[in-house]
């Protein structure tokens, strides 16, 4: 995100559901949650795009976004609903999509000197560039990660390679942070920094792949997106994945202060909402493909996803020392199921209209 969020202010904020705002190179996206019975219509006059909603609560609101495509929007009550007037910058075009389950209206505003066009069609007419997915098999080289029936560095690499193949078969470009048993730097902080740097805004989404170890009978799949936690168990896990020991503690502390800063950043929050959607879809798909125990979607201060400007998650695919799951993780069949699950979740997210392109 190359712009600065200058100011957001509310004239009335009680009970208001604002559109979620996402940005990407050359694109600003506003996502409005629509009640089932709501109707809407669009009209444009000059640089102002009006969306008249009926069957929604009356609202009064004014928000300055200051992105390269959108100045901001204001909302005023109207008979039976509200009117959102979005102020566009010069030289942009827009399109709208209506999406079901839950019902949403998506407004995308792009840089385009030539044409202004509108379409109100579900998920069609998209001419976005092919998505680029970054897969990050954790650890490698000097750092084996968790060790049990399998080594974390090995199983996550094999699952990543299989996931890459699945995605590429669907025309999705895939970038791996490593494709062999190697580290990116012997210094763990540098290593994690190099991986994190690949989650730049030219890519579509970032998935870091890890495996767990625990002393007792824990098993199953967990998916994380970035954020603070006060759960000591999750903090311990973050410290471990952030390099362990004193270094892991330091990087976790750094990540936690980023998490606190992001809470005041509306656009970072919007991106985290997309990350949450990616996490939910990925977990659902993984559990469906593998039959593994679902341990849920949670937030934790993982260093590798702290500064992602694209939807980013960290997946713990299973417990390497669980007597059953650990041994499954060693088999080609189960690794393929995990890869199918990961690819399925990523594709569901890309098809949902949530992805920032
Ligand atoms: Zn790990």
Image (cartoon, rainbow, N blue to C red):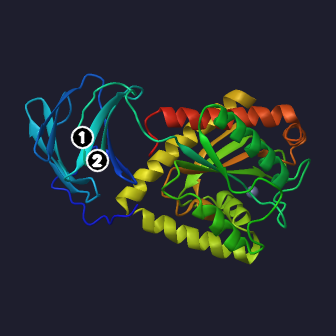
Disc 1 residue crowd, few under 14, some 14–19, many 20+, Cα 10 Å: few
* Mark 1 and mark 2 residues within 8 Å of each other at the beta carbon: yes
Helix, strand or loop status at disc 1: loop
Image point (49%, 32%), residue name = 351
Image point (55%, 68%), residue name = 256
Q: Position of residue 54 (x, y in %)?
A: 17, 28
Quarter occupied by residue 235? bottom right
In this rendering, the answer to whether 121 lies above or below 85 is above
Of residues 43 and 57, the one drawn nearer to the viewer in this rendering: 43
Q: Position of residue 178 (x, y in %)?
A: 74, 56
Residue 302 in view, yes or no: no
Q: CA distance from mark 1 to mark 2?
A: 6 Å
Quarter occupied by residue 338? top right
**Side of 60 relative to 187 (left or right):** left
Reading the image, the residue beneath label 2 is 112
Quarter occupied by residue 269? bottom left
**Side of 221 relative to 217 (left or right):** left
Helix, strand or loop status at disc 2: loop
Quadrant that contains the C terminus = top left
Reading the image, the residue beneath label 1 is 115
Of residues 322 and 21, the one drawn nearer to the viewer in this rendering: 21
């Amino acid at each position: 995100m190359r712009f600065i969020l200058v100011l957001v202010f509310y004239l009335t904020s009680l009970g208001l559901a604002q559109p979620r705002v996402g940005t990407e190179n050359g694109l600003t996206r506003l996502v409005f949650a629509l009640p089932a019975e709501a109707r809407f219509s669009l009209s444009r006059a000059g640089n102002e795009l009006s969306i008249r909603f009926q069957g929604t609560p009356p609202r009064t609101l004014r928000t300055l976004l200051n992105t390269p495509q959108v100045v901001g929007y204001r909302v005023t009550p109207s008979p039976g609903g509200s009117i959102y007037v979005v102020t566009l910058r010069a030289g942009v075009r827009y399109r709208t999509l209506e999406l079901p389950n839950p019902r949403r209206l998506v407004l995308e505003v792009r840089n385009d000197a030539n044409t202004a066009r509108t379409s109100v069609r579900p998920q069609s007419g998209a001419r976005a560039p092919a998505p680029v997915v970054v897969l990050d098999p954790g650890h490698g080289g000097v750092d084996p990660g968790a060790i049990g029936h399998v080594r974390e560095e090995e199983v996550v690499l094999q699952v990543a390679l299989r996931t890459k193949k699945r995605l590429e078969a669907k025309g999705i470009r895939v970038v791996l942070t490593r494709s062999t048993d190697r580290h990116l730097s012997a210094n763990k902080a540098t290593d994690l920094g190099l991986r994190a740097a690949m989650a730049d805004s030219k890519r579509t989404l970032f998935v870091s792949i890890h495996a767990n170890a625990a002393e007792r009978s824990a098993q199953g799949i967990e998916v994380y997106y970035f954020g603070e936690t006060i759960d000591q168990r999750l903090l311990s896990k973050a410290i471990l994945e952030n390099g362990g020991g004193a270094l892991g503690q330091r990087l976790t502390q750094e990540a936690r202060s980023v998490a606190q800063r992001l809470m005041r950043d509306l656009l970072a929050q919007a991106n985290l909402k997309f990350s949450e959607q990616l996490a939910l879809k990925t977990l659902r798909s993984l559990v469906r493909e593998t039959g593994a125990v679902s341990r849920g979607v949670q937030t934790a201060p993982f260093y590798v996803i702290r500064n992602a400007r694209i939807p980013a998650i960290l997946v713990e695919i299973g417990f390497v020392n669980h007597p059953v799951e650990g041994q499954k993780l060693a088999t080609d069949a189960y690794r393929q199921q995990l890869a199918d699950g990961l690819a399925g979740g990523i594709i569901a997210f890309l098809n949902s209209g949530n992805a920032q392109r």
